[in-house]
């Protein structure tokens, strides 16, 4: 009987500490849910100078129960674009709403045809790295995506092969991003001292 009392107490104790917001299964309810999720978890409003309450007032007026799902999706996607963040996307079965202006405004500094002049077809592959020793004793490494896994062994093998080179080109152009752990792991091989390269900020 003692264990039953403990179990009952635990149920009351834990349920009293957990709050789950409930929203209507409606166009307005979906809007409210998305706005609140961003409001509680997105941490860059101040940094980006975005008044999220003002965004609510503007976009809530555009929500109607008579609009179809495509129209709702478009409005919600526009609302998320207010934060101007290429990592914030709204995903549905028929489309992904995304903010592309950050990418469109970047200078086009990468041409895959030019890159082929460096690598050709006889290059080495070590994890996510493609590498080749160029004719002028320069080592060339291309890392096209920080999502592609690389280990210490991959990096060490490539750098060991280029140890006697006059220089190394580390090409990360046209990289779509990925895992910070991969980029930090690669960059750490070019530092002699512990160096702060960035920080993370969380909001809950």
Image (cartoon, helix red, strand yellow):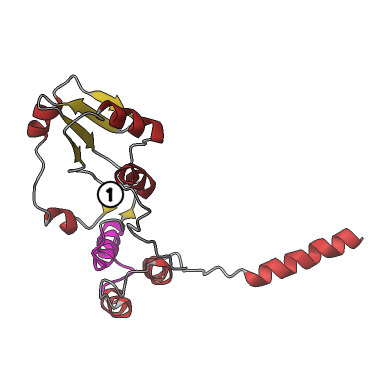
Q: Is residue 18 above or below residue 162?
A: below
Quarter residue 150 falls in: top left
Q: Position of residue 195 (x, y in %)?
A: 35, 56
Residue 76 painted magenta: yes
Residue that label 1 marks: 95
Identify the residue at horizontal 37%, vertical 61% (top origin): 199
Task: State which region is magenta.
Answer: 62-85
- Local packing at callout 1 (Cα closer than 10 Å; few below 14, some 14-19, many 20+) is few
Q: Is residue 91 above or below residue 81?
A: above
Q: Position of residue 110 (x, y in %)?
A: 11, 42
Quarter residue 32 falls in: bottom left
Q: Quadrant of the N terminus?
A: bottom right
Identify the residue at horizontal 18%, vertical 58% (top origin): 102
Residue 11 painted magenta: no
Does 10 sit left or right of 174 as displayed? right
What SS does tag 1 mark? loop
Q: Is residue 151 visible?
A: no
Q: Position of residue 29 (x, y in %)?
A: 41, 69
Q: Is residue 57 above or below residue 97?
A: below
Does 75 sit left or right of 194 as displayed? left
**Foreground of the two, 120 or 64:** 120
Identify the residue at horizontal 43%, vertical 71% (top origin): 40
Does 1 sit left or right of 92 as displayed? right
Q: Is residue 163 visible?
A: yes
């Amino acid at each position: 009987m003692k264990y039953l009392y403990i179990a009952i107490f635990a149920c009351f104790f834990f349920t009293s500490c957990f709050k789950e917001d409930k929203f209507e299964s409606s166009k307005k309810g979906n809007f409210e849910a998305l706005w609140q999720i961003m409001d509680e978890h997105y941490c860059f409003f101040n940094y980006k100078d975005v008044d999220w309450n003002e965004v609510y007032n503007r976009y809530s007026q555009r929500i109607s129960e008579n609009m179809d799902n495509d129209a709702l999706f478009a409005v919600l996607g526009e609302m998320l674009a207010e934060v101007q963040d290429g990592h914030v996307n709204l995903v549905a079965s028929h489309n992904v709403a995304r903010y592309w202006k950050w990418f469109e405004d970047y200078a086009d500094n990468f041409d895959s045809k030019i890159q082929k002049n460096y690598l050709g077809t006889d290059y080495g592959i070590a994890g996510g790295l493609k590498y080749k020793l160029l004719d002028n004793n320069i080592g060339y490494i291309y890392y096209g995506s920080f999502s592609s896994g690389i280990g210490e062994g991959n990096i060490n093998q490539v750098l060991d092969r280029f140890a006697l080179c006059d220089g190394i080109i580390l090409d990360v152009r046209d990289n779509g991003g990925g895992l910070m752990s991969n980029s930090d792991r690669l960059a750490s091989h070019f530092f002699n001292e512990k160096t702060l390269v960035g920080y993370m900020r969380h909001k809950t």
